[in-house]
Image (cartoon, grey):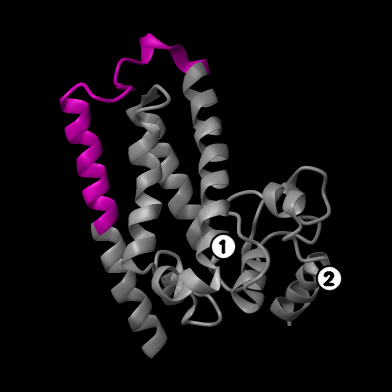
Amino acid sequence: MQSIFRDIQLSSLSTLVFALGAASIVSLYDLGATLLYSDLDKYGWEYLGFSFVVVLILQDAYFYFIHRLFHHPSLFRCFHRGHHRSGDPTPWTSFAFDLPEAIFQSLFLIVIVFIIPLHFLTIIAVLMAMTVWTVWNHLGFELFPASFPHHWFTKWFIGPTHHSLHHRKYTVHYGLYFTFWDKLLGTQDPQYENEFDSALRRDST
């Protein structure tokens, strides 16, 4: 219970940082300093979906590399230790970031609106996807079917078991949405599929 209370405290701090980041984006938009737009006809519906996917891919890459960097011994204590204090993750752990990490996490969307034209709906959809997926990955138990880590398509997505292994081992599974960077750069746990099958058996008993 104490660890959950600590996670709630850190999550509240992170929420404040993200809110300030969102306010900064709106202020910059009002000043005409971003590539944000509100007229759907400007780029069309096809671009709306395309830009959403592109932002998820870029955000996943950004998250992977800063997450892995924050696990370096010289940075871990100040940047990422708060997120790992709970041991086994729970939904309360999802946004339990130390202040420096929360700032770096919020910077992605602040910067991306200067690089890619994005509709406000796209920003909202990305925030919703990030929130749902992050909470899902911190459930601490598996809900996906047994085929999830083996199927040619779903094996590229991160789920609760995949991220739980990160919380237990620290040196694997740094991604946010996708397993691509872990597979490419050698941080995918070779025992992941076996762990997934074991988690399903535990959760079904």
Which of the 4 image quadrants contains residue 116? Answer: top left
Q: Is residue 157 magenta?
A: no
The image's mark for residue 3 is: none
Q: Dot 2, how many residues are within 10 Å of its Cα: few (below 14), some (14-19), or many (20+)?
A: few
Instruction: From this view, report whether residue 71 is shown above or below residue 132.
Output: below
Instruction: From this view, report whether residue 145 is shown above or below residue 61.
Output: below
Amino acid at pointer 2: Asn
Label 2 or label 1, whichever comes before in sequence order: 1
Instruction: From this view, report whether residue 90 is shown above or below residue 120.
Output: below
Residue topped by disc 2: 194
Can see residue 31?
yes
Residue topped by disc 1: 137
Which of the 4 image quadrants contains residue 50? Answer: top right
Amino acid at pointer 1: Asn
For the record, the magenta segment spans: 17-46
In percent of the image, x 63 and y 78: which residue is there? Answer: 168
